[in-house]
């Protein structure tokens, strides 16, 4: 059974840093496009970042320059390094595998259960 | 960036009735459109991709249609487990974007 398990969330002060992890089983992270999607409390879904199988990365403007997506192939794990956090970053963060339709990539076919990040003093 | 707009914000439907949800893209996204269902405290679940292809294990009562900028998700006969929030999402290019969601509630 495919599983994505996030960890690393918690309470952090504004300006702080946090690293989220997403451990994956039953498929290889490095062979897939992988993404982070977040959801602020009571709000909708917001795409955060993507890493291609070849290593190319993209970020939402709201996190560009502050967040870094990466992976550890030996651990089959996806990461999100978050720096300079603000209250607006408070959300449940989901990791997700990206599916493809023809030559178009970008929908999310498998999701983790999410990890809550709360930025507050 | 492409903006996704869903309507209505809330849809009140009786069990067994049909529900029709709309999604509009600010620019042409061709068939690069997905639909998700989310229940409280749970991760989103992929229902439809490519505007009309059901994901693995999704019941046939869920169907998607549309192309370009106008899309529809239809639930033919609402079951109790279908009351949830539904999101559309384009994946035509980065940044991908979600609509704000439609809550389907029991009438």
Image: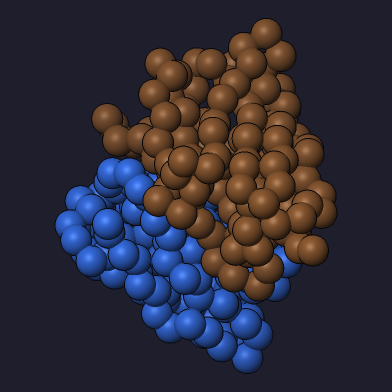
Chain colours: A brown, B blue
Looking at the image, which is closer to me, B83 or A105? A105
Numbered label tally? 0
Q: Position of residue A62 (x, y in %)?
A: 46, 54
The quarter holding residue A119 reads bottom right
Q: Position of residue B57 (x, y in %)?
A: 58, 44
Q: Is residue A80 above or below residue B64?
A: above
The N terminus of chain B, quarter of image: bottom left
Q: Is residue A11 left or right of residue A86?
A: right
Residue sticking out furthest to the front? A15
Q: Is residue A18 visible?
A: yes
Q: Residue at x 50, y 56 (%)?
A: A46
Residue sticking out furthest to the bottom? B107
Q: Position of residue A82 (x, y in %)?
A: 62, 41
Q: Is residue B33 left or right of residue A17?
A: left
Residue sticking out furthest to the top? A74
Q: Residue at x 59, y 53 (%)?
A: A38
The quarter holding residue A26 reads top right
Q: Position of residue A7 (x, y in %)?
A: 78, 38
Looking at the image, which is closer to me, B13 or A41? A41
Q: Residue at x 59, y 16 (%)?
A: A28
Q: Is residue B52 visible?
A: no
The C terminus of chain B, quarter of image: bottom right
Q: Is residue B15 above or below residue B54?
A: below
Q: Is residue A107 above or below residue A55?
A: below
Q: Residue at x 43, y 83 (%)?
A: B8
């Amino acid at each position: 059974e495919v599983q994505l398990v996030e960890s690393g969330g918690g309470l952090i002060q504004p300006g702080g840093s946090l690293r989220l992890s997403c451990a994956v089983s039953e498929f290889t992270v490095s062979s897939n496009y992988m993404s982070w999607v977040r959801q602020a409390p009571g709000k909708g879904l917001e795409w955060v970042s993507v890493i291609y199988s070849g290593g190319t990365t993209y970020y939402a403007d709201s996190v560009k320059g502050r967040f870094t997506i990466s992976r550890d192939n030996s651990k089959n794990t996806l990461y999100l390094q978050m720096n300079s956090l603000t209250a607006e970053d408070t959300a449940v963060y989901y990791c997700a595998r990206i599916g493809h339709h023809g030559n178009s990539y970008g929908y999310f076919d498998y999701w983790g259960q999410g990890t809550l990040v709360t930025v507050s003093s | 960036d492409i903006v996704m707009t869903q309507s209505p914000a809330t849809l009140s439907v009786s069990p067994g009735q049909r529900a029709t949800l709309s999604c509009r893209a600010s620019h042409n996204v061709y068939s690069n459109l997905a639909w998700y269902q989310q229940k409280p405290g749970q991760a989103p679940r992929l229902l439809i991709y490519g505007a009309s292809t059901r994901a693995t294990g999704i019941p046939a009562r869920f169907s998607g249609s549309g192309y370009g900028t106008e899309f529809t998700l239809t639930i033919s006969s609402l079951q109790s487990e279908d009351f949830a929030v539904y999101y559309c999402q384009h994946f035509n290019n980065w940044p991908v974007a979600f609509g704000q969601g439609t809550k389907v509630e029991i009438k």
